[in-house]
Image: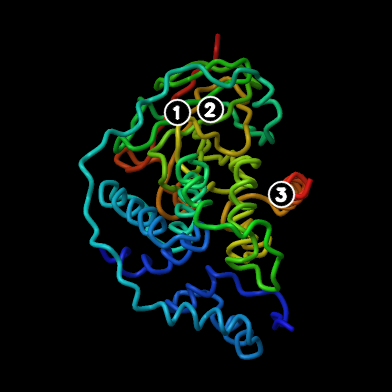
Amino acid sequence: MEAYQRYGPALLRKAARMLRNREDARDVVHALFADMLEERDMPADLPYLYRAVTNRCLRHLRDEKNRARLLAMHDDALAPVRVRLDEAALSMDLLVKLVSALGDGEAEVLAYRYLDDMTQEEIAAMTGLSRKTIGRRLDAIRDAATRVAGEAVS
Amino acid sequence: MSARCVSEPISWLRLERYALGEAPDAEEIGRHLEGCEVCRACLGRIEADAGTELPELRARSPRSLPPPWRRAMFAGGAAVALAAAVVLVVGRGPRVPEDPDRTKGAEVVFSLVRDDDTLFAEAGGTFRDGDRFKALVSCAPGTWTRFDLVVYDDHGATFPLDAPASLACGNDVPLPGAFLLRGASPMRVCLVWGEAPPDRGDLARSGFAPDRPRASCKVLQAAP
């Protein structure tokens, strides 16, 4: 499948950034393209696939079995935020707690903003939501992060 | 001291598209990269990873699509009432093309929910002047599609949504916004979808061709 060869590596990097685990990332990306083989009308441009992988990764993180296993690989709780918001910006511990604490829409925005470095404009374009809604969701994310971080140090 | 991006970091998606030669704003990204060591390093990581081997892609055994939802949902009308209303003013007209519910391909099903919680899952129904509706879409979870809603009457097409919506598929996924039906003539409410946003100009100009794929319609008659 051409899209798999062309976009698979980019999606694999994206999934690995979210899951912090290359094998899990491979599973997620492979499952996406396996579904595409069955559903021939599925869009095959990178932004679309990026969003599909984001949501599959979020589901993966929400799954309790996966969460426990992934956390066992990472004991770097609450690592400090770096200058560039890439894979170390959120520790695995904080990430899974936030994903659990947030609704689907907020968790998706979290991934785009803090794992993919997207601007609010890019997130709005990706999701079809207004800037105002994105702003509200970012506020909710910050509130959740404060709560989760507070629980972690108390 | 760690290096800082010179301004707003280029997102990973933009960098990936740039590396693939698909970035629509490649010049802007290129200029940024010239002056930004941090983002340039990120692009370098993408390029260094270019030899990534992918596992062999194998199709799974066929699976069934999610069943059409017939269950009543929207436990409270509040969900609809709170949704942003997009008002449709549609004039009275002599005729709406008579065409029952039609879905090309079974991958997408849609229903309309009136704000009294009445669910219109079948091909037709009735409406009263000023009734407010919301569209719910069911499609294969894990996929993404762009949807638009079109209301046809004899005057042509009207588009209740602000813009075509890109949705993560699932069961009973609400399209953003709600809409009012006004008038006493039959309305044909159609969901159209595709990989790219449905072309509204094309839909409005050509009308709803009987053999259009990726579309489903419901004809609502004005209540007596």
Figure quadrant of residue A105: top right
Give the quarter of the figure containing the N terminus of chain A.
Answer: bottom left
Q: How crowded is the residue under tag 2: few (<14 C-alpha within 10 Å), some, or many (20+)?
A: some
Residue at horizontal 50 percent and vertical 43 percent from the top: B148
Kindly check if marks 3 and 1 are in contact, taking CB atoms under 8 A apart as contact.
no
Q: Residue B103, percent across and down? A: 33, 33
Q: How crowded is the residue under tag 3: few (<14 C-alpha within 10 Å), some, or many (20+)?
A: many
**Above-or-below relation of A91 to B172:** below
Q: What residue is shown with label 3?
A: A141
The numbered disc on residue B96 is 1
Query: The residue marked by circle 2 belongs to what chain?
Result: B
Q: Residue A118, percent across and down? A: 62, 64
Q: What residue is shown with label 2?
A: B93
Query: The residue marked by circle 1 belongs to what chain?
Result: B
B49 and A75: which is toward the camera: A75
**Above-or-below relation of B135 to B19:** above
